[in-house]
Amino acid sequence: MRAINEVRVEFPSHSGNEAFARSCAACFAAQLDPTLEELGDLKTAVSEAVTNAIVHAYPDKLGTVGLKLRVLEGGVLEVTVRDRGVGIPDVARAMEPMFTTGGDERSGMGFSIMESFTDGLRVRSAPGRGTTVVMLKRLSRREES
């Protein structure tokens, strides 16, 4: 699909920047006039992807998280979250519900939540090279009153 508009931002992997990424995605998506429910779904999915990058990609240091947002033809929003952290050795295993490498304080539901709140999810990763998560969300314009 052809991109109609796009924006890219990078930020340090500070936990406070998760809220920034969520808000950034919602503001960019506003041009498609989504419903509040769609915005909530989008913000939740972005929150999970960015939190994964912050917590798992850089467990012992700060790194950079990239967020790319694209409006595609047909009212589809593409969200890409990328890190250059430790990577995931087994993506299929990491995407299983309840699987986590984050200890007792983590639920292991991040990828499952991303899948349930979007219309498409792709994850690419390589140990030592980082992870890229691409989510697609079809947004339906609200009816004109």
Image (tube, grey):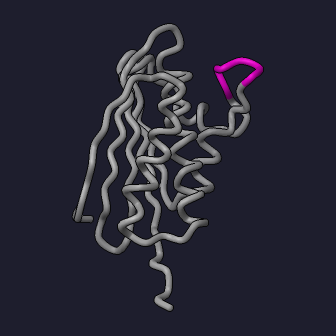
Which is more toward the observer, 50 or 57? 50
Main SS, magenta residues? loop
Q: Residue furthest front?
A: 145
Residue range highlighted in magenta: 100-105
Residue 142 point in image, percent of width and height:
49, 80
Which image quarter: residue 12? top left
Q: Residue furthest bottom?
A: 145
Which residue is painted at 53% across and 13% down in the image?
59
Considering only vertical position in the picture, is 117 above or below 46?
below
Q: Quadrant of the N terminus?
A: bottom left
Residue 88 point in image, percent of width and height:
49, 24
Residue 39 in view, yes or no: yes
Considering only vertical position in the picture, is 76 above or below 115?
below
Residue 51 point in image, percent of width and height:
55, 32
User: In the image, is residue 132 part of the stretch drawn in magenta?
Assistant: no
Which is more toward the observer, 145 or 99? 145
Which residue is painted at 31% across and 38% down in the image?
9
Q: How many numbered marks does the figure carry?
A: 0
Considering only vertical position in the picture, is 44 above or below 10?
below
Which residue is painted at 57% across and 40% down in the image?
48
Tell whether 103 sits left or right of 18.
Answer: right
Residue 89 in view, yes or no: no
User: In the image, is residue 103 part of the stretch drawn in magenta?
Assistant: yes
Q: Residue furthest top?
A: 60
Residue 31 point in image, percent of width and height:
36, 67
Which is more toward the observer, 106 or 86? 106
